[in-house]
Image: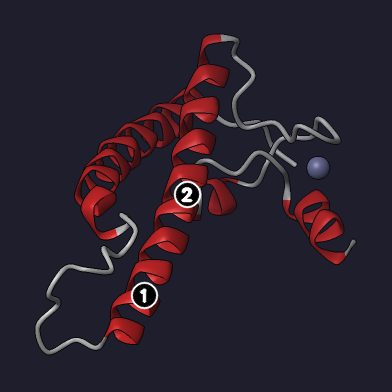
Amino acid sequence: MDERTEQELEELRVDLEKLKSELEELLALSKDGAKPVELDEPIGRLSRMDAMQHQQMAVANRQSHQLRYKQVCAALNRFENADYGYCRRCDEPIAFGRLKARPESPFCLNCQGASERR
Ligand SMILES: [Zn+2]
């Protein structure tokens, strides 16, 4: 597989920065939704069940955003070491198409597949 060019890397770095600020925004917005449901609080037309389900979903969403945020930060850190774009497992360059779709991917498609099958 080809190594990433400077231009491709720059493009991906911009994508990562953008993703980082989007996730920061999402995390700031989801702060309130993920708070535990106050049981004495009047919750209007929503039943308590709905409110709790809604809150659980908000927590799950928030957790996946937090995880992705961590991966994005880790990917940006790897630029510092000129280590970005290489699989953390097999050390092969990760395909550009894959990085373009998920610039924070730490693994190549093969290794990602292997860890998901486990
Ligand atoms: Zn790999």
> Badge 2 is on which residue?
100
Q: Is residue 40 above or below residue 17?
A: below
Which of the 4 image quarters holds residue 18?
A: top left
Left or right: residue 13 versus residue 39 is right
Which of the 4 image quarters holds residue 93?
A: top right
Q: Residue furthest right?
A: 118
In depth, the one of 63 and 117 nearer the eye is 63
What amino acid type should be assigned to the residue bearing mark 1? Met
Q: Secondary structure at mark 1?
A: helix
In depth, the one of 50 and 96 nearer the eye is 50
State the mark number for residue 52: 1
Q: Residue furthest top?
A: 81
What amino acid type should be assigned to the residue bearing mark 2? Lys
Q: Which quadrant holds the C terminus?
A: bottom right
- Where residue 1 sits in the image (x, y, percent)? 75, 42
In depth, the one of 74 and 59 nearer the eye is 59
What residue lies at 26% left-to-right and 44% top-to-bottom?
22
- Where residue 95 sits in the image (x, y, percent)? 64, 47
C-alpha distance separating marks 2 and 1 = 36 Å
Q: Secondary structure at mark 2?
A: helix
Q: Is residue 90 above or below residue 95?
A: above
Q: Residues within 10 Å of mark 2 (few under 14, many from 20)?
A: some
